[in-house]
Amino acid sequence: MTRKPTDPDPAQFALFEESAPVSPAPAAAPLAPPSTTLPPPEPAVSIASVLSPAMFRHPQASREIHLDDHLVAYALKRVRRRSIGFIVGLEGLSVNAPKWVGVSDIEFALRAKGPWILRKLHEQRQRQQRLQASKVEWRDGTSIPFLGETVIVVLDPRVTGAVLHSDDTTLPGVARHTLHVSLPHTATAEQVRDAVQSWLQRQAKRVFEERCQHYTRQMGVRYTRLSLSSAQTRWGSASADGSIRLNWRLIHFALPTIDYVVVHELAHLREMNHSPRFWDVVRSVVPDYEAARGTLKGDVLPVFD
């Protein structure tokens, strides 16, 4: 079922809501000395010249366009907004446009942003391939990331619930953590997945509460409520009423990455925007926050299906 698009809540801010970049105005070319003969400029390298001709088709595509030699079938949605917006996700390209904008104007905008669109489509296709490779086979001996380290799942009916064991004497490169889950070896994949996910969510609630309390004291802010989310595109959000939502999948990452997201959302309680003042607040607590942002964008987490 296609959901009717709604305007975003101005009181909430999410990490990594990405839109097409605005093309900068061309810089003036430097003047050459009168006696110097300049060689002809080399043509710019485009993403289309690097990629083999390909087809990118959104599952809900309603229109097609050729960007260089690449066929891009995109989903066109007529929405209430003032300008044309492009969203490149795992499914492909979606275009949101006002009702009064003609198809010719939409295609003109698509061609103007063609290199950016093709680059993002290529990146998403590579990400999709990594996601396929990261699907977990839920069984005894499978591995999952937890706080940046590898944990081996052990089906162990002798324990109650799920118990994490750590061995500091293991060799380098060998997982030193095992999660003993109270299930028999005949347990189904769904039973293993649900037991592990439940344990991860409990740990996420515990760790996030601890980190929020730590940084509220340091930053001089106060949140009213912390809840877990399972959002597909948001790592966290903050509301003007002081409530914080954090994606439980953050528990897969190492603590510095979790801390960045926590600080990001708590900083919104002082600056409910993404202004330079907001980033100054984040930087004052996490000076190297760019590294954490890169980890969130680049790492591929296990697929829970």
Image: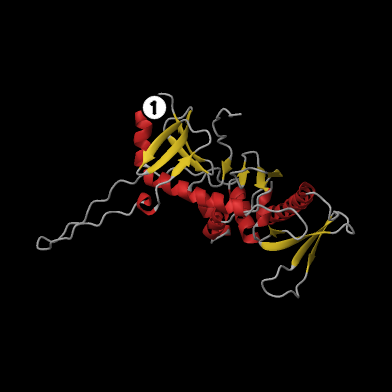
- Circle 1 residues within 10 Å: few <14, some 14–19, many ≥20: few
Task: Tell me where residue 3 appears, x and y as whole percent.
Answer: 59, 29
Residue 119 higher or lower than 58, as above or below: below
Rendered residue at 76%/61% (across/down): 141
Camera-nearest residue between 236 and 11: 236
Question: In the rendered view, does 39 fall on the left or right side of 35?
Answer: right
Residue 259 higher or lower than 7, as above or below: below
The amino acid type, in three-letter code, at marker 1 is Val
Rendered residue at 45%/38% (across/down): 86
Identify the residue position indicated by label 1 in the image.
Answer: 101
Question: In the rendered view, does 101 fall on the left or right side of 13?
Answer: left
Task: Tell me where residue 106 appears, x and y as whole percent.
Answer: 38, 32
Task: Tell me where residue 247 appears, x and y as whole percent.
Answer: 66, 47
Q: Which residue lies furthest to the top in this view?
A: 100
Name which quarter of the figure residue 237 lies in. Answer: top right
Rendered residue at 43%/24% (across/down): 99
Name which quarter of the figure residue 163 lies in. Answer: bottom right
Q: Can residue 277 be seen in this view?
A: no
Q: Can residue 91 be seen in this view?
A: yes
Q: Residue furthest right?
A: 158
Camera-nearest residue between 7 and 269: 7
The secondary structure type at the circle numbered 1 is loop
